[in-house]
Image (cartoon, grey):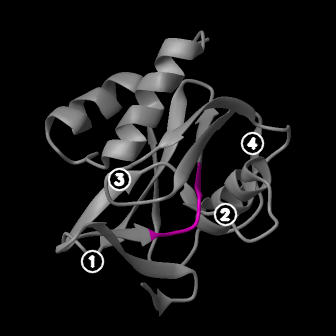
Amino acid sequence: MKKKLYKSIFLIKKKIKKKEFYYYLQVPNFSILIPKIENKFILVSQKRYAINKVTLEFPSGWIDKNENPSAASTRETFEETGYKSLIKPKKIIDFHEEPGRLTSNVYVYFSDKLKKLNKPEKNIKIHLLTQNEIFNLIKKKKFNNGTHIAAFLAFLNNTKIK
């Protein structure tokens, strides 16, 4: 059974045994850009209604149909922050964010050549933070999106920081 919940979100009910079913969500793939200006990373804060809290994250969002992940990462960054990447972002990693319940794949990119061209999206605040400040926010559970933490750690592991 496949039930449409919203635009491109579907609830899937899959029979795995005679009287046993498994439920998961089919959702669009997701793109994250880790933007950096000099020695600071650009983060956004916005309310996440599922946990009823304001969280800090990197700019990110769903990849539109027929859009490539890199283009989605720069589009989302521009929409959310007003910053435009002046280069093609470097791919860091891609992975399944929650293969037990979601079908989506996450694509993570990095850019350190950005220009401020617009205001941030409504209800989003921009924060410029150092690597150590982000680590402290992770410890304090203020930067607490597991997918974004994994993206940040993959970035640190795979990229020499200038």
Where residue 38 appears, as percent x and y from the top left, is: 62, 26
Q: Is residue 87 left or right of residue 4?
A: right
Task: Check if mark 2's residue and mark 4's residue have beta carbons within 8 Å.
Answer: no
Residue holding disc 2: 63
Distance from Cα at disc 3 to Cα at disc 2: 20 Å
Of residue 45 and residue 23, the one placed in the foreground of this image is: 23
N-terminal-most mark, 3 or 4 = 3
Where residue 126 appears, as percent x and y from the top left, is: 48, 56
Q: Quadrant of residue 52?
A: bottom left
Kind of element beneath mark 1:
loop
Task: Check if mark 2's residue and mark 1's residue have beta carbons within 8 Å.
Answer: no
Residue holding disc 3: 56
Which quarter of the figure is the C terminus placed in? top right
Kind of element beneath mark 2:
loop
Give residue 49's mark.
Answer: 1
Kind of element beneath mark 4:
strand
Magenta stretch: give its range: 26-31
Is residue 127 visible in the rendered image? The answer is yes
